[in-house]
Image: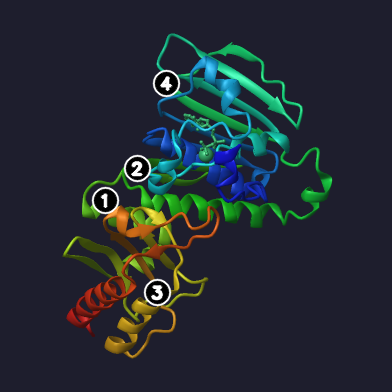
Amino acid sequence: PRLANQIAAGEVVERPASVIKEVLENSLDAGSDRLDIDIEDGGIKLMRVRDNGIGIDKDDLPLALSRHATSKIYQLDDLEAVATLGFRGEALASISSVARLTITSNTGGDSGWAARAEGRDMVAEVTPAAHPQGTTVEVRDLFFNTPARRKFLRTEKTEFNRIDDVVKRLALSRFDVSFNLRHNGRAIHSLRKATSQIEQERRVAQVCGPAFMENAVHIDVERSGLRLWGWVALPTFSRSQADLQHFYVNGRAIKDKLVTHAVRQAYQDVLFHGRHPAFVLYLDLDPSTVDVNVHPTKHEVRFRDNRMVHDFLFRSLHHALADVRP
Ligand code: ADP
Ligand code: MG
């Protein structure tokens, strides 16, 4: 409990998209390179994620469902250098308290096992179940026992779009993982692993739309331990939908004032047009010089040396944009 108290507790389950985010992050933490996501009725009826990760041992299955059980922190010091996406050990417990949750898993043995939990009084009985190596998490009837929360849900379409945003955001951060998303039996995304730049650009086009990629320039700059790479759109890309701004720090999606400011300045300086730049950018730097766990649900980041990072972003983008100025 001492450990748990030191971690900002967040209300995890707000809507279907927050469930999907937690479940997918667990799958990625488990080393999966293939994620199959099935959604029904905007996630309210069903969300099912199958991965091919390390799986969960039979004995650990009921444990995985209990509050503050995490396999990802071993001592307090680890909190300083959390490498995995999950670190609170409460997502599955929170989900099972407001839905019907089944986890089926196989760690590579002959057979798999399933554990089921429903509502606050969980029935964490473990039964044999066939499953290939990996884990399937199935969440049915979200908020079946909390009608008040159910009322706050929007239309199926809106809830699905939020799920789609979560999947897209992750798909842009993990080119080494294939993603298959289906809604009511219809394929929404089939994203294969992308290794080469061409394959990555295909994925970005699939996720952000072909028009973004057609009007974007590729950038890849490295200087004194910092690397900025990705794609920035030229002003010829006119967008009707909402902002297309994806920024990842060491693979984690963030929204940050310093970053936005640096990007905007570079656009304004070179193109005299910086109001709504569109970009998919990745900043990789020494993890000890950045804190991305300021809050588990906000996507903020704290750099040790703000000025250096701002400078690097501004100059790199300035250079890339000046090169291709129309
Ligand atoms: P956290 O991710 O913060 O540790 P969760 O409640 O999300 O907490 O998950 C609890 C535990 O269940 C994890 O620490 C992990 O050991 C296990 N787990 C959950 N999902 C998976 C998965 N897809 N593959 C392997 N292990 C998993
Ligand atoms: Mg987790």
Quadrant of the rendered image containing residue 66 = top right
Quick check: 210 above or below 277? above
Circle nearer the N terminus (2, 1): 2
Q: Nearer the viewer, mark 2 or mark 4?
A: 4
Q: Ligand 1 near label 2 (Cβ, under 8 Å)? A: no
Quick check: 158 above or below 313? above
Which residue is identified by label 3? 258
For the point 27% across and 73% down, the residue is 308
Q: Ligand 2 near label 3 (Cβ, under 8 Å)? A: no
Q: Judging from the image, what secondary structure is the residue with disc 3 in? A: helix
Quadrant of the rendered image containing residue 314 = bottom left
Tell me the kind of residue under disc 3.
Leu
Label 2 – label 1 distance at C-alpha = 9 Å
Q: Is residue 118 visible?
A: yes
Circle nearer the N terminus (4, 1): 4
Say if mark 2 contacts mark 1, CB within 8 Å: yes
**Rendered image: mark on residue 133:** 4
Tell me the kind of residue under disc 2.
Arg
Quadrant assignment for the C terminus: bottom left
View extreme (front): residue: 2
Quadrant of the rendered image containing residue 281 = bottom left
Q: Is residue 185 visible?
A: no
Label 2 – label 4 distance at C-alpha = 20 Å
Which residue is identified by label 1? 199
Which residue is identified by label 2? 192
Q: Nearer the viewer, mark 3 or mark 4?
A: 3
Q: Nearer the viewer, mark 2 or mark 3?
A: 3
View extreme (right): residue: 147
Tell me the kind of residue under disc 1.
Glu
Left or right: 200 in relation to 56: left
Circle nearer the N terminus (1, 3): 1
Quick check: 135 above or below 215? above
